[in-house]
Image (cartoon, rainbow, N blue to C red):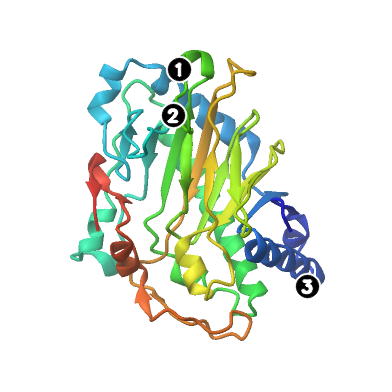
Amino acid sequence: MTAVPLVDLAPWYEGTPAGRRQVATEVDRALCEVGFLLVTGHPVGAQLRDRLRAGVRPFFARPGTEKAELACFPGGRGWTPPGHSGAVPPDLREAFTFGPEQPPPALVGTPEEDWFGPNDWPSSTPGLAAAAAAFAHCCAVLLDDLLRVCALALDLADDFFVARCTGSPWSVDLAWYPAHCTLGSVLPGQMRVGGHTDAGTLTLADRGPGSGGLQVRTPDDVWVDAPAVPGALSVNAGDLLARWTGDRWRSAPHRVLPPSAERPTEELLALVFSQVADPLAVVERLPTAAAGPSRYPPVTAGQFLRDRGESVAAGRGRTVRP
């Protein structure tokens, strides 16, 4: 498999054992060979996604001086200004990030409690918070379904992953990629998002209308385009899930190409839901022959993030470095 595959989830939701096994087999193959897939037949409706885009677009249109009161460093909650991604040359994007507010009881009084807290919403977009909450809820439900697909693919108990991700400090990035005509120029090698892997279990993204520009690096070190399929969502495994499966599943490097001069007015507004796991969940060799041996020692999800030096979207618009 050298391309990002398209998987229809409809047989999973139909509920027959054969249909569910078919979807699990297709997802397993995609995560093994590519680390990415596109899914259709999912419950995250177009109206919900359009509502969130309509809610956040006016915020990105505001002057930078007005957005600055919600500014944060990459990994925090609030507005990440253009040029603050840490990439060289800087990524051609800006983003608004939010996450879960209430920590699970087991995390109260621990350092991980700071990974939860109130979100700061722009006063100029009064409908944004409600639209964002509805989108996040629907994505969380879909990701639980996908974790059950993953469990079936590995012959694990149905709730194996779901039970270990209930306290996830998830985050949503609403990422705006300006059009070429807005930027004026693009530096050599500059990307909308430079090559990287994700930290957590699964990432779910609605790339929105347009060419997309998403590319995935294959095991042969070749960058391939992820097709732009209307209505489809992209799904990819993160570093934590790759470790959990003994690298059976790939955490594939991916990037977003710069805006094309051939489509000078095309801007993109991506909606990205990233899941980690319960910070206290122990990530260790799976009790299944499907995953095979692991060269990694056991670690909690929270400690994994600290060891990786990952930023976690913390409450109150701050960036917490674990």
Q: Are marks 1 and 2 in contact (CB under 8 Å)?
A: yes
Identify residue for label 1: 183
Identify residue for label 2: 92
Q: CA distance from mark 3 to mark 2?
A: 45 Å
Q: CA distance from mark 1 to mark 2?
A: 8 Å
Residue 103 in the image, given as x and y percentages of width and height: 30, 58
- Above or below 234: residue 268: above
Q: Secondary structure at mark 2?
A: loop
**Residue that appears at 46% across and 81% down:** 295
- Above or below 27: residue 253: above
**Residue that appears at 73% across and 54% down:** 7
Residue 136 visible? The answer is no
**Residue that appears at 55% across and 49% down:** 204
Sequence-first tag of 1 and 2: 2
Nearer to the camera, 135 or 88: 88
Amino acid of disc 2:
Leu
Amino acid of disc 1:
Leu
Residue 41 in the image, given as x and y percentages of width and height: 73, 49
Residue 100 in the image, given as x and y percentages of width and height: 36, 50
In the displayed orientation, state which residue is furthest to the left.
109
| Label 2 crowd bin: few (<14), some (14–19), many (20+), radius 10 Å | many
| Label 1 crowd bin: few (<14), some (14–19), many (20+), radius 10 Å | few
Identify residue for label 3: 17
